[in-house]
Image (cartoon, rainbow, N blue to C red):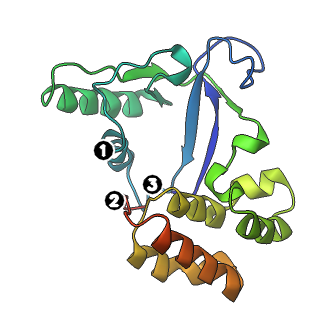
Amino acid sequence: MVRTRVGYSGGLTPSPTYRNIGDHSEALQVDYDPSRISYRELLDIFWRAHDPGIRSWSRQYRVVIFYHNEEQKRLALASIDREASKRKDIYTEISPFSGFTLAEDYHQKYRLQQESDLSAEFDAVYPSMKDFLNSTAIARVNGFLGGYGSPELLAKEIDSYGLSASSKKRLIDLLSSTRPVFRSCPL
């Protein structure tokens, strides 16, 4: 995974916002390096990360895979077929990608923004929101703060994030004290 962004997708309403989402759904946009992880592997992670048997209570919160081309469509449909062989009800949708609108800044890298000291250190390196959003290091740290990854992976990567010694310690302390269970994610 290179970077992630949150926003709105799947609708026709122009310029959606959180307060005026129209017919869009909240979405996570993932940029990835196919030489390191395949689209099929991303789909496997997607299926492990949610319960496809739970019906979304509104279009805003529906669970949907937006495909960009016929190969992604084929793989997404095959993945939903695999899931359907394991359970009766699947409410996850597969739809063509039609565009993506970034969510407001306060929604981006939400977990990291809740940690003001860490966020401030990254703000000094990435002063614009565009740079902040495009940073792989920020995406990785936000993921760890959300409970994804492993202590071993954090130890392996932490020196590459450009953090001061005190921020590295703060990140390790946060993850060991407040988030004792890491969810499995190979990214």
Nearest the eye: 159 or 50 = 50
Circle 3/circle 2 CB separation < 8 Å: no
Q: How many numbered circles are shown? A: 3
Nearer the N terminus, badge 1 or badge 3?
3
Residue carrying label 3:
34
Q: Position of residue 163 (x, y in %)?
A: 69, 79
Q: Which residue type carries mark 2?
A: Ser
Nearest the eye: 171 or 135 = 171
The circle on residue 48 is 1
Q: Quadrant of the C terminus?
A: bottom left
Circle 1/circle 2 CB separation < 8 Å: yes
In this image, 32 relative to 135: left or right? left
Q: Nearer the viewer, mark 1 or mark 3?
A: 1
Q: Position of residue 98 (x, y in %)?
A: 60, 21
Q: Secondary structure at mark 1?
A: helix
- Which residue is rendered at x = 56% and y = 38% of the image? 28
In this image, 22 relative to 32: left or right? right
In this image, 130 relative to 33: left or right? right
- Which residue is rendered at x = 31% and y = 39% of the image? 47
Circle 1/circle 3 CB separation < 8 Å: no
Q: Which residue type carries mark 3?
A: Pro
Q: Nearer the viewer, mark 3 or mark 2?
A: 2
- Which residue is rendered at x = 69% and y = 79% of the image? 162
